[in-house]
Amino acid sequence: MLNNFLMFYAPFIVLIGSLVLAFVVAPKDDAVRRQIDEEE
């Protein structure tokens, strides 16, 4: 039961986790912050 649950939801958990991680790490990245400042 739990194995089927993980098989189905693992890709969504990884996808959401990577998006959250990207938003957490991005503000700390100087290159990204510099690019945002240039666009404004």
Image (tube, rainbow, N blue to C red):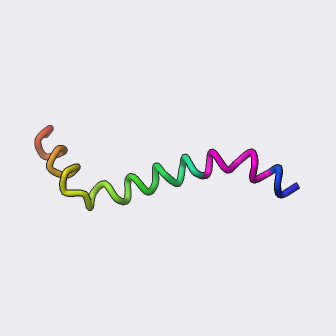
Quadrant in the rendering for residue 30: bottom left
Nearest to the observer: residue 35 or residue 7: 7
User: Where residue 25 appears, x then y in whole percent?
Assistant: 34, 59
User: Where residue 31 appears, x then y in whole percent?
Assistant: 19, 51
Residue extending farthest to the top is 39
Residue extending farthest to the right is 1
Q: How many marks?
A: 0
User: Where residue 23 appears, x then y in whole percent?
Assistant: 38, 53
Q: With 24 as the anchor, is 35 left or right in this view?
A: left
Point 46% across, 49% down: residue: 19
Q: Main secondary structure of the magenta part?
A: helix
Viewport quadrant of the N terminus: bottom right
User: Where residue 39 appears, x then y in whole percent?
Assistant: 14, 38
Point 39% across, 52% down: residue: 22
Q: With 5 as the anchor, is 17 left or right in this view?
A: left
Point 74% across, 45% down: residue: 8
Nearest to the observer: residue 33 or residue 31: 31
The magenta segment: 5-13
Viewport quadrant of the C terminus: top left
Quadrant in the rendering for residue 27: bottom left
Query: Is residue 36 positioned above or below 20 on the image?
Result: above
Residue 10 sits inside the magenta stretch: yes
Point 26% across, 61% down: residue: 28
Residue 9 sits inside the magenta stretch: yes
Q: With 32 as the anchor, is 6 left or right in this view?
A: right
Q: With 38 as the anchor, is 20 left or right in this view?
A: right
